[in-house]
Image (cartoon, rainbow, N blue to C red):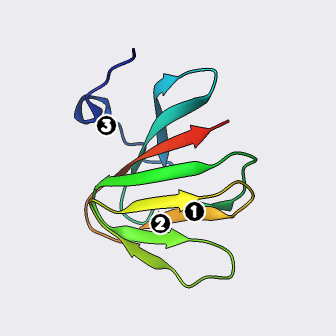
Amino acid sequence: MQYANYQDKIAYSQEKANKVALGETAQGRMTLWCLLPKQHIHPHIHAGDHYWVVLEGTGNYLAEGLDPVSVAPGTVLVAPAGESHGIENTGTEGLVFVSISAG
């Protein structure tokens, strides 16, 4: 078993969205993403499924061909393999979410 309290792992970067490893197995990985206001992750595609759970802050989920979707704490997002996904922090505080990647 791997264990982490996400609040102890929050780390922002002034340059870009910051990725913090929380755990990894042969079947997937869990990452904590920390974005300062106005930071973003451009829509991109992966071969495996991605699950995002917003823990803190507000923003927009971005996907090619779709209007931005507002996200806030408690929002759960699923990006199936091959579907574009990205996010932007539109708030005045940090945006923190967990990304779980399968495969």
- Nearest the eye: 51 or 22: 51
Which residue is the extreme one toward the bottom?
A: 67
Is residue 40 something that shows in the picture?
A: no
Find the distance from the CA under tag 3 to the CA under tag 2. 17 Å
Find the distance from the CA under tag 3 to the CA under tag 1. 19 Å
Q: Looking at the image, tell me whether mark 3 or mark 1 is earlier in sequence order.
A: 3
Quarter of the image for residue 65 reads: bottom right
Q: Which residue is mark 3?
A: 10
Q: Secondary structure at mark 1?
A: strand
Q: Which residue is mark 2?
A: 88
Q: Secondary structure at mark 3?
A: loop
Is residue 85 something that shows in the picture?
A: yes
Q: Which residue is mark 1?
A: 86
Quarter of the image for residue 76 reads: bottom left
Q: Are marks 1 and 2 in contact (CB under 8 Å)?
A: yes
The location of residue 72, given as percent across then percent down, is 30, 66
The residue type indicated by label 1 comes to: Gly
Q: Residue at x 23, y 35 (%)?
A: 7
